[in-house]
Amino acid sequence: MAKNWMVSEDGSKERLNIKENLRFMLKNWFEWDKKSLWLLAYSTPSKIALPALTALIPKLMLDAIAQDWLPAKLIVLIAAMSVLLALLSWIEPNLNEKLRVSGQLARMKYRIMSLRKIMRIDYETLESPEGSQKLAKAKDFSFGGRWSPGEDFFAAVKDFISSAFGLITFAALLTRLSPILLAIIAVGCGLEIWGFHLGNQNMFKYHRNARPNYARIEYINRVCTDAETGKDVRLYNLQPWFMDFMHSVVMSHRKLVGKLIRQDLGTKVTLGAFAGMLREGAAYFFLVQAVLSESITVPDFLFYFGIVTGFSAWLISLTWQWSNIQRCCKACQHFRDYMDLPDNAQAGNLSVGDSIDEIEFRDVSFTYKGSIDPVLKDVSFTIRKGEKLAIVGENGAGKTTLIKLLCGFYPPTKGQILLNGIDIREYDRENYYKIFGAVFQDFTFLPVSVSRNVTIAPQEDEDAQRLEAALRNAGLWDKLNALPDGLESPMVKDVWEGAVNFSGGERQRLLLARALYKNAPVLILDEPTAALDPIAENRLYEKYSRFTQGKTSFFISHRIASTRFCERIFYMADGKIAEEGNHEQLLANQGAYYKMFETQSYYYRKELGTEDIGEEELAV
């Protein structure tokens, strides 16, 4: 089995299976675009014939002149050669363009495969450092910029095949003249290829050493063009620091470029010049000797010199395209490694019933991969249909991790999560996701209309009455209908120039409308209002509470006053449920929950200038 080594970004070596990657890409090529294989068969002869004809035409012309052809006959020959040359010059690039379209099709197919995998892969893998690294490498194969291996593999294979047949054809012609000349030219080309190889190694080392500079330049560009950062730059006069930092990066990069140039002068350029001298010198020597010995004519001299040049070009091209194919195989290896990551999203096959009667955490512990300390430690509780559960605590207490496990994004390291008495891993994952209406702190709006952002459904599947009810309950109906395009107003300014721009509070109400429209039996709010002030957050939580009667609800917040309407409250600390009860019970216990509430109440009163107001009045 054809295997090789590939060097990873950190300089370590990884096994590269060229044969398997070639089979993978060729199989996809055949399945996706069989027609392009015929185009490849047509383009190869035309690509070989073009340089051969270019070398042959001067010989034919000189032979015709030496034989005193009549002008009319000579004109016919010139016209015929010109037409043939023009035809070949038209066919080859035309077929190339069609094959380029095939490459672009493959690139889009690989993108679709990659996107489908990203959206279906286990969330645990997606969020892990290993998954992130593999995804970053895999993206180069299908989402690369100017050079995309998934697309360029087509061109590399096409040119490799053409170069192989061209090399065989021109070698056969040169063998008739002198096998020794063929060997010397091959040695000269080998030296030039070795120079290219050393140059590529130098370039690889340069890019690896320059990567920190690229990251620093990207950081400077990102920070300096950010409007938010621009305020600090101006207020604190950071321009000199950024300019000094940029100057140091440029000087460091200049040294790396200088080293690369010196290395190339000592290897690629020197070897290339010597190889060219050997190749051209040998060709002139043998061809002149052949003319002097009358074994070939002067027109033959021109023809064979063109063949020598063409042979060298084919050999160098063959090596270069094989290098490109190896690069494609390396990128394909990363792509396939990512595609082979675990995807157990459809492991279960049970369907969730119509009623969500009970959700139970039974001795659940969880530790992130690569971490030693568990985030959750033997957490046990049961929440029944229609209950409202608030989960509060300081940052890092395990609140969000608990929700990730509830949603099935991660499997517990220990213990079980049961839905209606059945382990949630037994359920079909897509069916299981349908029971949740979740609003997270980090949210995304799609570059589509407002209505579709709320319904998350094609326009023909939207329920107009349900949509209106959700928007009215969220307090957005009048606002949206006052827009020029109403509910069809596009969102996301990065994509649409005239997209509507909502305030932070309006975006939160849109998320409320989305959750209300989905009407899922389980509602999850994972600190979606962290960016709002306490009063605005409390009002929004009251809206959620009012419109989610009868739903099983989880409210996660580090602000205690926002979740006091829940029947039960968990105060989490160090991965455990440290305190449990309703708001009044936990205050009466005067434990950690009481201390946190007292601290927050003091600062809220101070912020509002109402230090003398009691906590009950503040809560109201």
Image: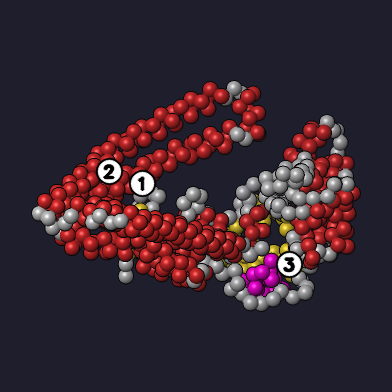
Near mark 1 (Cα within 10 A), the count class, few <14, some 14-19 or many ≥20, is: some
Question: Do callouts 3 and 1 mark residues in contact (Cβ within 8 Å)?
Answer: no
User: What residue is at 35 percent from the left and 49 percent from the top?
Assistant: 11
Q: Which of labels 1 and 2 is toward the front? A: 2
Residue 415 appears in which quarter of the rendering?
bottom right
**Residue 513 is inside the magenta segment:** no
Q: Which residues are magenta?
A: 418-435
Residue sitting nearer the eye, 490 or 513: 490
Residue 607 visible? The answer is: yes
Q: Position of residue 292 (x, y in %)?
A: 11, 51
Q: Which residue is mark 3?
A: 435
Residue at 57% over, 62% down: 112
Q: Is residue 362 above or below residue 63?
A: below
Q: Nearer the viewer, mark 3 or mark 2?
A: 2
Label 3, label 1: how far apart the Cα atoms are:
50 Å
Q: Earlier in the sequence, mark 3 or mark 2?
A: 2
Q: Is residue 605 left or right of residue 75?
A: right
Q: Residue furthest bottom?
A: 350
- Residue toward you, 187 or 603: 187
The kind of secondary structure element at disc 2 is: helix
Q: Which residue is mark 2?
A: 268
Type of amino acid at the residue the image marks with label 2: Lys
**Earlier-in-chain disc, 1 versus 2:** 1
- Residue at 77% across, 47% down: 507
Where disc 1 sits, the SS reads: helix
What whole-number distance in Å separates the C-alpha atoms at marks 3 and 2?
Answer: 63 Å
Residue beneath label 1, please? 204
Above or below residue 197? Residue 99 is below
Dot 2: few (<14), some (14–19), or many (≥20) neighbours within 10 Å?
Answer: many
The residue drawn where x is 78% and y is 62% is 459
**Is label 3 or label 1 in front?**
1
